[in-house]
Amino acid sequence: MTILVTGGRGHVARSVVDGLLATGARVRVASRSPERVVVPAGVETVRADLADPRTLPAEEALRHSRLAWTFLRPGAFATNTLQWAPAIRASGTVRAPYPQAHAASVHEDHIADVAVLALTRDGHQGLTHPLTGPASVTQQEQIDCLAAATGRKIRLAEIGTEEYRATLRQWGDEEMVDTLLTHLAEADNRPAAVCSTYRDLTGGPGRSYAQWALDHAADFR
């Protein structure tokens, strides 16, 4: 079976692959940047970009094709906060605007659980599953979780959006920067919507951002 991964810094792909291999499935991973996806030896990786019709039909074409499909729609990836890791390791201080901006960040293993379930059990073909974390947390609360997980003092220093814009340019183009800053402004003091998909499908509550911080503590030390 083929997994198409379009986000998550490769962490989602590895979690899904590990879960599928545990069931005995043969797996191939398709990604916009296959060279960045870390998979176990023997797992094939190929390039596929939903925005590039030369490598894969666009999503609408997939919906109307004869192929079986299930779409997962994660919200904010918890792995996005790995961008804070260099600053935390160097100084213990994250410089960012909107400390009270909310997100219901998704653990990559949370996504993987649903992906494995959808790929190995009947009843998911032709469905779209929205995914969020189990709770809405602010940027300050995320920092607090990272401090607790690493056992070190971590501070969030609030800065203006233009200063943050200069930092974000390291990670993407102006369109991406504008989108992120707009999202943070809209999420300021506004809890993010939390969906029940994970609990409905698995019977469990899903992994919190605090759990994600514990799982990735070594990245911030």
Image (cartoon, rainbow, N blue to C red):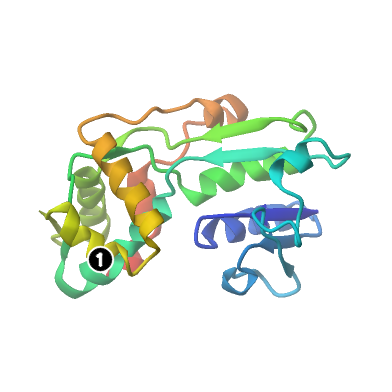
Looking at the rendered structure, the kind of residue marked 1 is Thr
Q: Can residue 96 be seen here?
A: no
In the foreground, 66 or 155: 66
Name which quarter of the figure residue 141 lies in: top left
* Residue 37: image location, x then y, percent: 59, 68
Q: Is residue 74 left or right of residue 99?
A: right
Count of all numbered marks drawn on residues in the image: 1
Q: Residues within 10 Å of mark 1 (few under 14, many from 20)?
A: some
* Residue 95: image location, x then y, percent: 16, 60
For label 1, the residue is 167
In the foreground, 177 or 108: 177
Name which quarter of the figure residue 151 lies in: bottom left
* Residue 199: image location, x then y, percent: 53, 28
Q: Is residue 64 left or right of residue 213?
A: right
* Residue 74: image location, x then y, percent: 52, 41
Residue, x 75% and y 61% (percent of image)?
Answer: 55
Residue, x 27% and y 55% (percent of image)?
Answer: 149
Residue, x 56% and y 27% (percent of image)?
Answer: 203
Q: Quadrant of the C terminus?
A: bottom left
